[in-house]
Amino acid sequence: MLTALNKKHIPKPIIIISKPNIQSKILSNLIEKGLGVDCEIVDTCAIKKDRSDFGFMLLDCNYISPSQAKSLLRSFDASLKNISIALINTQHDEDYENLVFWPQVNGLFYEDCNQEMLLRGLNELIQSGQWLPRELSKKIIDEHRRSAKVINDLDILTSREKDVLIKISEGLSNPDIADKLNINQHTVKTHIYNIFKKIGVQNRTQAANWAIRYMKNE
């Protein structure tokens, strides 16, 4: 067991969102033995949104796609705003890495992370509330260095374009956006074309990720 863990404070259980199988059980046993923290494996379809009896949540990306993870995070944002989430078994893929910009996500572990590093990272999450791999931290720092341009991009967007971009980040289709904003679909398409051109993206996924990163306070 890691000696860095404060034994005077027994952390709440860790919820592992995964398929209940041998692999997830091995992961649960590893954490329980290595950190002395109880774990509970819960399938995605069995999550109770009103729970508050756990320390933080691990999303097993072996069984959760980026789009499924976003849907879960949206539902948690409405019902479990104060939970802390870490992603485990993630691929070295931008769609997964961009999930760390969601407010609840405080940790990420790649699928090739070894057991020692996983336990050290989880221990750090328990102690200080955050853990990211070094290579991902560097990417995030590089993103912040481009923040001046982003601020200019936000100033370029009109108020209505910002409204449309936020709806894109929420996963709404063009007809849904038109209905929510009380405008026609042709106008929505025009706004989207202008948004893509102004912020330098090529598709809705990139636009949604851009909004999640840079429009948290809009």
Image (spheres, rainbow, N blue to C red):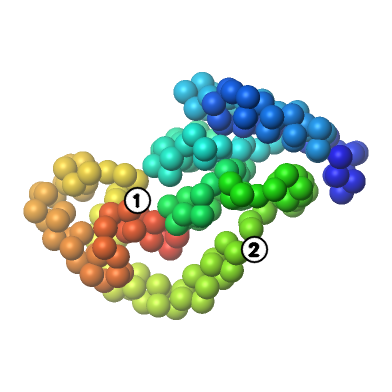
**Which SS class for mark 2?**
helix
The N terminus, quarter of image: top right
Residue sitting at x 34%, y 51%: 169
The reply to whether residue 166 is in sight is no
Looking at the image, which is closer to me, 187 or 142?
142
As shown in the figure, which amino acid type bears the numbered disc 2? Arg
15 is higher (above) or lower (below) than 158: above
Residues at marks 1 and 2, CA–CA distance in whole angstroms: 27 Å
Residue sitting at x 64%, y 58%: 133
Looking at the image, which is closer to me, 76 or 179?
76
The reply to whether residue 207 is in sight is yes
* Whole-percent x, y for residue 36 in the image: 82, 33
Local packing at callout 2 (Cα closer than 10 Å; few below 14, some 14-19, many 20+) is few
> Tag 2 or tag 1, which sits nearer the N-term?
2
Report which quarter residue 38 is drawn in.
Answer: top right
Residue sitting at x 10%, y 49%: 184
Q: Nearer the viewer, mark 1 or mark 2?
A: 2
Report which quarter residue 27 is drawn in.
Answer: top right
The C terminus, quarter of image: bottom left
Circle 2 residue: 134
